[in-house]
Image (spheres, rainbow, N blue to C red):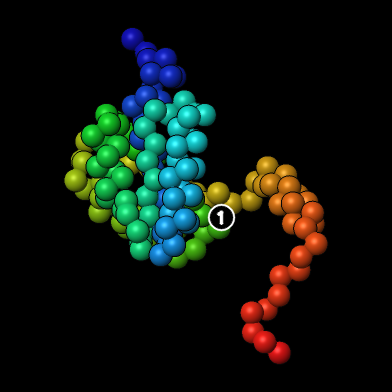
Amino acid sequence: MESSPSRITERVGIILVDHGSKLEAANKMLEDVARGFQETSAYAIVEPAHMELAEPTIEQAMARCVERGAQRIVVQLFFLSPGRHSMRDIPRMTREAAAHYPGIPVHISDPLGIDPRLNAILQSRIEEALKFDVVAANDEET
């Protein structure tokens, strides 16, 4: 008997992973993204993770997914382009964390990359910036 798509997504854990920051506001933004994605997607299990500098770590997020009932996990890179962290460091950290859960398949996505939908976001941000009559100045005095 096959499961319906919604039944399948209930058992898939999604880990959104970014670099991590010393700035709490930057780390909180990923929590907000994860919460928003969970609320608007078919996935019931969505956890944020930071590669370094902040918690939760990839290992902690993976443990949380398993505790919440994930039978398969996708580590979604919250990076725009491929680089050392997204192509080497995070896959290594993911393999190390996944070793604790040998019966659970773990997949790693590509970085977000080039997507035509980003053009609308860029256009919106540029229009917002142009609404203000303020030019960013260098903090150094001349």
The N terminus lies in quadrant: top left
Residue 126 figure quarter: bottom right
In the visual, does 25 lie left or right of 135? Answer: left
Question: Residue 61: in sight, yes or no?
Answer: yes
Kindly identify the residue that appears in the image at 76 percent across and 68 percent down.
Answer: 135
Near mark 1 (Cα within 10 A), the count class, few <14, some 14-19 or many ≥20, is: some
Q: Secondary structure at mark 1?
A: loop
Residue that lies at the very extreme toward the top in this rendered image: 1
Question: Residue 108: in sight, yes or no?
Answer: no
Indicate the position of residue 109 as horizontal and vertical percent values.
Answer: 46, 46
Indicate the position of residue 70 as horizontal and vertical percent values.
Answer: 30, 31
Kindly identify the residue that appears in the image at 44 percent across and 62 percent down.
Answer: 23
The C terminus lies in quadrant: bottom right
In the visual, does 8 lie left or right of 118? Answer: left
Kindly identify the residue that appears in the image at 48 percent across and 29 percent down.
Answer: 39
Q: Nearer the viewer, residue 122 or 8?
A: 122
Kindly identify the residue that appears in the image at 39 percent across and 36 percent down.
Answer: 46
Position of 104 relative to 139 (above/below):
above
**Which residue type does callout 1 highlight?**
Leu
In the visual, does 25 lie left or right of 125? Answer: left
Residue that lies at the very extreme toward the bottom in this rendered image: 142
In the visual, does 27 lie left or right of 130? Answer: left
Indicate the position of residue 56 as horizontal and vertical percent values.
Answer: 32, 51
Which residue carries the number 1 mark?
A: 80
Q: Number of callouts in the render?
A: 1
Indicate the position of residue 72 as horizontal and vertical percent values.
Answer: 32, 34
Position of 27 relative to 68 (above/below):
below
